[in-house]
Image (cartoon, rainbow, N blue to C red):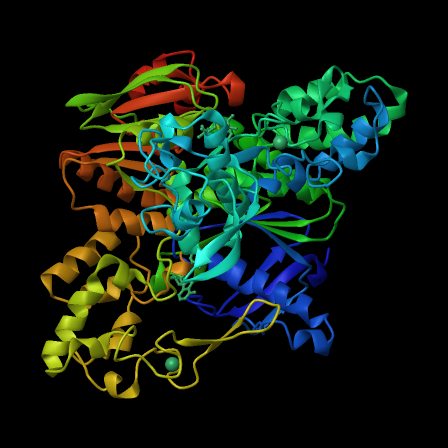
């Protein structure tokens, strides 16, 4: 049979970033998985070439007029990219959205639940808007549908043991000589020298809660009408009944200490009006159903046998089942999306697409296994297969062997990172990969080894009677001076136990997480790790000039772009457009600065070096030590000047790790540090963790990766399941013990 080229996305001569003029074909309506060491070029193919071209083509569909307002997407560096369909990128970016965005709203499940209540709820109250806390008709009037309400912290605002002159009112502007205090005193109604505790009840009420009233005030000899209002009443009107977030940052800072936040006393957090809450389905109101774990909710919905609701019940249970299928049965519909982890966010987005009716779309996933226990990986695989079977092309960047197994086609990128990568080292089936001599093939076949000589703890840190979220009165000892791995299925309570309860008690721990670093567009690995300071000094002394010249934040900066290397053009209502600076060509420095050399290289050339190249170039002891730390955490391929904003979550985590490596006697807490790491890099990471422990530190790691679990000195396994069926410590002990123990799911997978 002659294969038609239409059946493939065809890429020829791709050269983005480190790609080595490569050509490949990706079968359409199949699952293709890209693998290879970190920095080998997977993202350069999948995101910077395929997804970028698809976005660019999409924008070409707009009229010329509209396009003049859109950012210009340059064509990716490639000779040709053919047969692309529309690409949808399902990534790990957290779902923001504030308190009005919930799991139910983002998956479009909430509107169906409201429809259900308006059809079969008892007593009948319809209209359907009544059940939406985003709708003025439905929202609780006391809290505007937020479920929480703000109040004044009385202990911080008022000191009853003092008089007004002694500063009884501690709110801003009520101190001695304060404007607000003056107005109150000018009204003549209050004794400034009487302790508040001696005020008569109606006097105190007037002082604190009095409604606004006009009084005549003597102002430099002139009589003026002013408005006097109770101090707490005024504060509430000004800062609590209005959106405080809309005020200046300074104002927010000054008033924040006086404000407390609690559950709304009118709706008790349900966000809805009393009329909506009185209406019930199967004996539960809409807030109760939205607060129920999805696994339980789907069972209750299926029990509805009212024929009037049959189509709605059908649609609802189908969508809820998707959430159960992907292992999110422990979440509730009212869960605010900005509290979901990166992995959970990606799976929620995935569910949205499963319910959609788009076909012939190219779906692109970025390590979708993040946050999933080995037990649940098969659920992810089934979802990827469902998307494919609907007629879509599925492209996945992934390191987990259990996901790689389901690929119809595998592309292994390598052989190494950066300039030593950028080639395709294998294309074909899973069996073919195992037989290929590539790093991925090699590590895929390697059996797990359980750690034998586990270290003896030097002491312990205790958590006692923890009951936050789903934790069921958990008391656990975390050993010090060893490597502890906290594991368990998603939703079992690992992050709650470690990131919230444990860190709440041990604030001095060094947390190495995946959150973005470097708020400024000017930070890069060199500035973050402090290498830049030493490099500037070296340039200054070699050329006998001021070291400020070698900073793109100061004297040396290109004047056109102020050292940013790019110029932002602001557009009235769209994101601003970023263009390379025409004067310095993106080099960020003034031309005269670039004339100064260190061992033949300009400062801009140094910033373009990868960590690996810089290690070969520099001899300065401090610089070498810091570069070596970055190299040790597998960041050889990163350039010194790459903006931190372009790094992935996993890379951010490893840069943080590199800059904290030299501390001693500390507690380190890491959250899935293997994210973004190829199997061959995990050995490196383990070496670093072991080095930290050998230097006298305590290392606590939340992980699902079986290789890391197998190398722990101590395992704490949370479970047995997610959500309300989890929240317990099901096992504490060594890797060999967990495998012998029958009860632990993790133990079964390790065996
Ligand atoms: P992978 O996805 O396999 O981890 P990448 O495609 O992200 O690898 O990176 C391949 C190479 O390209 C690395 O050397 C990386 O540092 C470089 N690179 C990636 N993105 C950029 C960028 N925006 N600017 C400069 N270099 C980049
Ligand atoms: P893990 O880290 O093991 O995946 P988590 O600690 O994130 O588990 O979650 C444990 C339980 O607590 C789950 O039922 C989860 O839905 C719930 N939970 C976690 N964070 C929050 C939050 N911010 N608000 C409400 N519930 C939460
Ligand atoms: Zn309310
Ligand atoms: Zn410039």
- In this rendered view, identify the residue nearer to me: 109 or 227: 227
Residue 307 coordinates in the image, percent (x, y): 89, 21
Query: Is 339 positioned to the left or the right of 296 in the image?
Result: left
- In this rendered view, identify the residue nearer to me: 706 or 339: 339
- In this rendered view, identify the residue nearer to me: 658 or 195: 195
Q: Quadrant of residue 218?
A: bottom left
Q: Quadrant of residue 538?
A: bottom left
* Residue at image coords 72%, 70%: 61
Query: Is 410 positioned to the left or the right of 566 in the image?
Result: right
* Residue at image coords 76%, 26%: 275
Query: Is 184 positioned to the left or the right of 389 in the image?
Result: left
Q: Quadrant of residue 257?
A: top left
Residue 28 coordinates in the image, percent (x, y): 67, 53
* Residue at image coords 50%, 31%: 205
Q: Is residue 418 above or below residue 13?
A: above
Q: Quadrant of the C terminus?
A: top left
Q: How many marks?
A: 0
Residue 442 coordinates in the image, percent (x, y): 38, 43
Does the rendering let one see residue 718? Answer: yes
- In this rendered view, identify the residue nearer to me: 99 or 626: 99
Residue 59 coordinates in the image, percent (x, y): 67, 69
Q: Is residue 11 above or below residue 398?
A: below
């Amino acid at each position: 049979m002659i294969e038609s080229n239409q059946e493939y996305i065809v890429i020829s001569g791709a050269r983005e970033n480190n790609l080595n003029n490569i050509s490949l074909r990706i079968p359409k309506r199949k699952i293709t998985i890209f693998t290879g060491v970190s920095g080998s070029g997977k993202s350069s193919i999948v995101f910077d070439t395929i997804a970028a071209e698809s976005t660019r083509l999409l924008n070409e569909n707009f009229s010329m007029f509209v396009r003049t307002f859109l950012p210009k997407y340059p064509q990716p560096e490639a000779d040709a990219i053919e047969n692309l369909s529309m690409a949808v990128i399902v990534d790990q970016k957290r779902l923001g959205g504030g308190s009005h965005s919930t799991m139910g709203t983002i998956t479009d499940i909430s509107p169906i639940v409201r429809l259900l209540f308006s059809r079969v709820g008892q007593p009948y109250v319809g209209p359907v808007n009544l059940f939406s806390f985003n709708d003025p008709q439905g929202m609780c009037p006391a809290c505007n549908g937020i479920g929480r309400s703000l109040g004044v912290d009385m202990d911080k605002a008022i000191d009853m043991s003092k008089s007004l002159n002694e500063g009884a009112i501690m709110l801003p502007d009520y101190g001695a000589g304060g404007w607000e205090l003056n107005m109150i005193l000018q009204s003549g109604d209050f004794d400034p020298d009487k302790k508040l505790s001696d005020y008569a009840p109606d006097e105190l009420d007037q002082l604190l809660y009095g409604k606004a009233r006009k009084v005549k005030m003597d102002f430099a000899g002139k009589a003026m009408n002013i408005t006097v209002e109770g101090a707490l009443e005024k504060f509430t009107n000004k800062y609590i009944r209005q959106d405080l977030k809309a005020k200046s940052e300074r104002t927010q800072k000054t008033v924040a200490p006086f404000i407390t936040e609690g559950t709304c006393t009118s709706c008790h957090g349900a966000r809805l009006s009393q009329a909506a809450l009185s209406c019930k389905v199967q004996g539960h109101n809409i807030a109760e159903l939205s607060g129920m774990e999805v696994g339980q909710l789907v069972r209750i919905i299926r029990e509805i046998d009212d024929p009037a609701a049959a189509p709605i019940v059908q649609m609802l249970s189908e969508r809820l089942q998707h959430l159960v299928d992907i292992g999110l049965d422990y979440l509730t519909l009212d869960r605010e999306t900005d509290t979901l982890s990166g992995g959970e966010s990606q799976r929620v987005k995935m569910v949205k697409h499963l319910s959609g009716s788009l076909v012939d779309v190219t779906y692109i996933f970025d390590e979708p296994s993040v946050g999933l226990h080995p037990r649940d990986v098969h659920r992810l695989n089934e979802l990827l297969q469902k998307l494919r079977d609907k007629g879509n092309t599925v492209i996945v960047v992934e390191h987990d062997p259990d996901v790689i197994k389901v690929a119809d086609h595998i592309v292994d990128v390598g052989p190494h990172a950066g300039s030593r990568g950028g080639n395709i080292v294998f294309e074909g089936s899973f069996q073919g990969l195992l037989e290929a001599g590539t790093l991925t093939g090699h590590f895929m076949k390697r059996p797990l080894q359980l750690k034998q000589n586990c270290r003896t703890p030097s002491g312990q840190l205790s958590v006692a009677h923890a009951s936050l979220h789903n934790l069921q009165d958990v008391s656990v000892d975390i050993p010090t001076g060893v490597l502890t791995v906290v594991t368990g299925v998603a939703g079992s309570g690992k992050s709650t136990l470690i990131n919230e309860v444990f860190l709440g008690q041990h604030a001095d721990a060094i947390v190495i997480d995946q959150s973005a670093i470097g708020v400024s567009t000017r930070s890069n690995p060199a500035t973050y790790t402090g290498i830049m300071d030493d490099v500037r000094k070296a340039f200054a002394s070699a050329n006998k000039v001021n070291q400020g010249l070698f900073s793109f934040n100061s004297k040396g900066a290109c004047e056109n772009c102020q050292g940013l290397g790019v110029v932002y053009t602001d557009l009235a209502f769209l994101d601003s457009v970023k263009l390379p600076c025409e004067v310095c060509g993106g080099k960020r420095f003034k031309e005269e600065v670039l004339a100064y050399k260190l061992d033949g290289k300009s400062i801009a050339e140094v910033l373009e070096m990868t960590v690996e190249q810089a290690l070969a170039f520099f001899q300065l002891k401090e610089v070498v030590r810091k570069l070596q730390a970055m190299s040790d955490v597998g960041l050889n391929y990163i350039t010194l000047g790459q903006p931190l904003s372009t790094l992935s979550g996993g890379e951010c985590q490893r840069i943080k790790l590199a800059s904290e490596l030299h501390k001693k006697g500390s507690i380190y807490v890491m959250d899935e540090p293997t994210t973004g790491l190829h199997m061959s890099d995990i050995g490196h990471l383990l070496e670093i963790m072991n080095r930290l422990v050998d230097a006298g530190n305590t290392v606590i790691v939340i992980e699902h990766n079986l290789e890391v679990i197998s190398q722990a000195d101590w395992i704490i396994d949370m479970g047995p399941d997610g959500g309300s069926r989890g929240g317990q410590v099901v096992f504490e002990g060594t890797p060999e013990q967990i495998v012998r123990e029958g009860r632990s799911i993790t133990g079964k997978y390790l065996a």
